[in-house]
Image: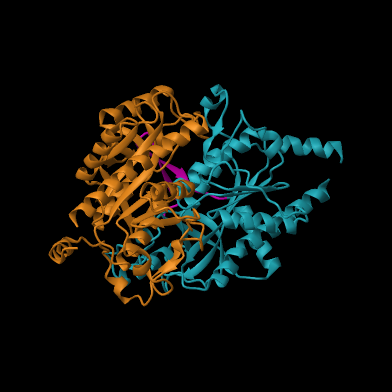
Chain colours: A cyan, B orange
Amino acid sequence: MDPKDNTSTASCESPVCVHNPHLDSLKDDILYHFSLGTGTHNLPAMFGDVKFVCVGGSPWRMMSFIKYIAAELRMEDPKSEYPNICAGTDRYAMYKVGPVLSVSHGMGIPSIAIMLHELIKLLHHSHCTDVTIIRIGTSGGIGLEPGTVVVTKQSVDATFLPKFEQVILGKTVVRNTDLDQSLAEELLQCSKELNQFETVIGNTMCTLDFYEGQARLDGAFCSYTETDKQDFLNRANEAGVCNIEMESSVFAAMCKLSGLRAAVVCVTLLDRLKGDQLSSSSEVLHDYQHRPQVLVSCYIKKQLKAKAARR
Amino acid sequence: MDPKDNTSTASCESPVCVHNPHLDSLKDDILYHFSLGTGTHNLPAMFGDVKFVCVGGSPWRMMSFIKYIAAELRMEDPKSEYPNICAGTDRYAMYKVGPVLSVSHGMGIPSIAIMLHELIKLLHHSHCTDVTIIRIGTSGGIGLEPGTVVVTKQSVDATFLPKFEQVILGKTVVRNTDLDQSLAEELLQCSKELNQFETVIGNTMCTLDFYEGQARLDGAFCSYTETDKQDFLNRANEAGVCNIEMESSVFAAMCKLSGLRAAVVCVTLLDRLKGDQLSSSSEVLHDYQHRPQVLVSCYIKKQLKAKAARR
């Protein structure tokens, strides 16, 4: 390795920022929902080499992703064993292969926010640098063929505005939901090279509820008509919304605050203009859910290849 | 059984209400996040006898609860096997013993709301009647000895008001968070009879975030001082708030809408006036988390005994 290049890279390294002066006065930091901590685990040794973090709702999917990316990077464990690093809790699951960390986050803004607070502290305590984080999820599409992958341009709320409202000590603070546009373009380029499924860049609506919050007609409660529903989804579509999910806004806001390069890549499981129920076969849904993994895996491989070439 | 009594009971039976005219036009109803459905499962046969539903965040805890209540009701499976009824998905876990259903709901309002929409439809499709539902959870206490159990009087938001704001088609609808006061009193009475741990009735604050939303000083981000934190918690306490968690408001609102008799029973894992980190040993935390189970189990046994005596 050229020492000059190394120095030059080091000087550009981007840390993972926390914004909390109180953390310095903590003797140990217990990451309770991961069952990890600075007093009980050597976090820099465990996570210091992490460069890519992929997060998704389902623990099974994040386990399947680590197996897939391990094979793609030719870093398979010969015994196919990928231990859950958070085995001491059932709140989240976490897996690691080389520079890739895979973490589940459950469903909804509060659930992913708890995970991100502890993940950002984990990356910070581990002295990680230049970390890219990508949410690989599922969503409902608007006017797209089911199976289409959406890379989020902006995460918008249920009034189609690109903001996240965080309540702090009872007062609402508005946070920006910008994502990394160059990363989104690079992911779109990967999809073109793969040529296996349709991928688009568009706005993603993030809601606090799956049924009434997303204008579904099949929840336990529904006080609006099919026409009201279509009108709401059409207005969303006119505002550039391609898909709807439940985590992107706080994900974008928190990653931006901590200086993480972030993207949201969600497959659409159905076209919400045509229905509400997820009635496709489990094989079809499983194939759809694999698509963001294929796309992100392609991106990570390209990045690692480019980095190796620079050495 | 006296047929007259039977008729008299039948006439008082309270159904589980859905409020959605669109459900009648669905051929099948797929409860996607449970991996169950009316077209694939005989729901009345599987769930028609359910009278008590206990819900909690962690799947492990809800499995441990079903084993415990099975032993308490002398309905143990000789092989100690309690299959997860939702084994086809990892979103939620569900277990059943006799008239008791135990369901996990993950963390936060959106996660429990998805589960409740599908649970209310499940109970409705199963023609269940006279169902009592109790959330058994964990929380941070305010000015209480850790391990104290709080039965919620009212669920309040981060401004200490007893309301839940549901966003429907981009518009905010305010819902009532009343819980069943007689059920809360009956649970308090059970605790007195048990005499094993302290139980109080008080208000519960329900937040959308665990760190900044609950005035913690140990998140990735914190822009306020220790004094600001103490001031917020003291104001909460003056408003009758005994503990803080993340699901009670939507739980209260949805159960009220569907006519379910509902209670929230949460143990306090720490006193937030004295700290933020969950640093007690896992044995102590485990013991605390068992307390709501003991209390609710005592209540269920009393109810079943009273019902048997009426026959």
B301 to the left or right of A251: left
Where does the image place residue A78, in percent across and percent down from the top left? Answer: 78, 54
Where does the image place residue B268, in percent across and percent down from the top left? Answer: 38, 33
In the image, A109 versus B259, the foreground residue is B259
Residue A159 visible (yes or no): no
Where does the image place residue A23, in percent across and percent down from the top left? Answer: 54, 27
In the image, B121 versus B101, the foreground residue is B101
B296 to the left or right of A102: left
Residue at the (36%, 40%) spot, across then down: B294
- Tell me: residue B239, above or below residue B157: above
- Tell me: residue A309, above or below residue B285: below
Residue at the (28%, 44%) spot, across then down: B299
Quadrant containing the N terminus of chain A is top right
Answer with the quarter of the image where residue A89 lies: top right
Magenta-span inclusion, residue B58: no
Residue at the (30%, 31%) spot, across then down: B195
Where does the image place residue A243, in percent across and percent down from the top left? Answer: 48, 63
Residue B283 visible (yes or no): yes
- What segment carries the magenta color? A159-179
Magenta-span inclusion, residue A177: yes
In the image, A5 versus A218, the foreground residue is A218
Answer with the quarter of the image where residue A34 lies: top right
- Tell me: residue A134, above or below residue A291: above
Outermost residue toward the right in this view: A2
In the image, B139 versus A166, the foreground residue is B139
Quadrant containing the C terminus of chain A is top right
